[in-house]
Amino acid sequence: MKEFGSDFHYIQPSESAVESFSSFYPDAVFYASGRHALIDLYKKMKWNRIWVPDYFCYEVLGSLKQAGLNLEFYTDCPLFNDNELMPSLPYKDGDVLFRVNYFGLRSKRSNNSIPVPVVEDHTHDLVGDWAKNSDADWCIASLRKTMPLAEGGVLWSPKGFRIPTLPKVTESNEVLASRRWNAMRQKAMYLDDKIQDKSQFRSELISTEEQFDSMKVSGLDSKTANYIERFDLNQWYLRKRENWSILKDIETDVFRVLVPENSNCNPFSLTLLFSEEEQRNHYRQTLINKDVYPAILWAIPPHKSSELKQFSGRVLSIHCDARYGIDDMIKLRDIITDC
């Protein structure tokens, strides 16, 4: 592979029998993004307040506030024991709890002791034990974070609830999806050395990504919906697990690899935890210089707790999904080890 990480390039879906997303969740409904699913659900359920973790993507939280959701924060991150915290929050009538499976590291949680409706975010592990056996009222995910899609969010209910009405596909969303698909195809050409300049597709991907922050709630573009049904999600996750296994035993003096709670979890990425932020930043830049583009999940605002800011400053996410083969992972492991 010419480079690692950053946005997905276009990947041809399977032409044979597949285990698509609908094979796992046949009653799921699709949106342009995961945040659209949550916004639409919140408003149609007429909830008053949603409890959200303060370790999360603040671009998404900003979109939720802009859309009129009343946010109440609780403290959580991958290192915390969330099972002890959730039942004890000071809930009120009309509240709903939003739980997150960070980096696909958490095993199944029960919501039996929680006195309000629960929405779970399974973006980082779509087919793990927790997602497939959830007892939440609702589950959502941003599909484009873990699948090679131009857009895509999803909503389903483990309890069999139904959303009253589904949103129509907006014209602006169709335009955005088309632009992103084109940019993804250009990136595929770049990786195949068919074009040399990546500035144009990078600019398009960044520009359209920013538009998700202010888009009106929309259904899924038809081209994306067709792709999802032709995409073998099961094979994608099997290859992803194999890739992660090649990297998981890397040992250095500057970081440790965060590992899932059990073998039924599917890690989102190779997630590294450094001792200090300065070490993390230096390591990140060294990787970038070697054409490896890790992600920081996520930047936490200055007014949040020092514990969360410290964790955010020490974590680094390196992509190891199924766009890469075994040889790519061996190359990536050598790069990481030699930094």
Image (cartoon, helix red, strand yellow):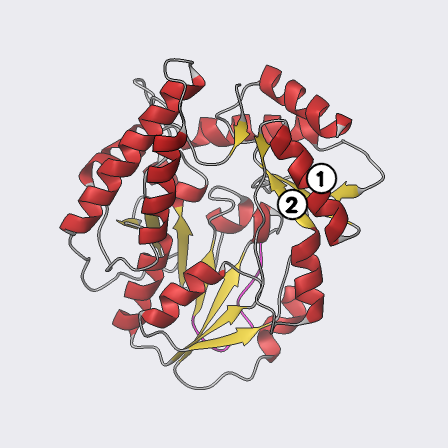
Q: Is mark 2 on a helix, strand or loop?
A: strand
Q: In which quarter of the image is residue 291?
A: top right
Residue 224 in picture, x, y percent from top left: 26, 37
- The residue located at (25%, 37%) in the rendering is 179
Provide the secondary structure element on which disc 1 rests. Answer: helix
Amino acid under disc 1: Tyr
- The residue depicted at 65 percent of the width and 33 percent of the height is 287
> Considering the image in quadrants, where does the C terminus appear?
top right
Does residue 49 appear to the left or right of 4 in the view shown? left
Mark 1 near mark 2, Cβ–Cβ under 8 Å?
Answer: yes
Picture coordinates of residue 250 (x, y %)? Answer: 76, 31
Distance (Cα) linking label 1 and label 2? 9 Å
Of residues 75 and 162, the one nearer the viewer is: 75
Q: Is residue 49 left or right of residue 280?
A: left
Which residue type carries mark 2? Leu
Q: Mark 1 points at which residue?
A: 283
Query: Magenta residues?
Result: 108-117
The residue wearing badge 2 is 316
Q: How crowded is mark 2: few (under 14 residues within 10 Å), some or many (20 or more)?
A: many
Image coordinates for residue 283, horizontal then vertical, percent: 71, 39
Crowd tier of the residue under label 1, counting other residues whose Cα lies within 10 Å: few below 14, some 14–19, many 20 or above: some
Question: Which residue is found at the position 46% from the left and 44% from the top?
Answer: 126
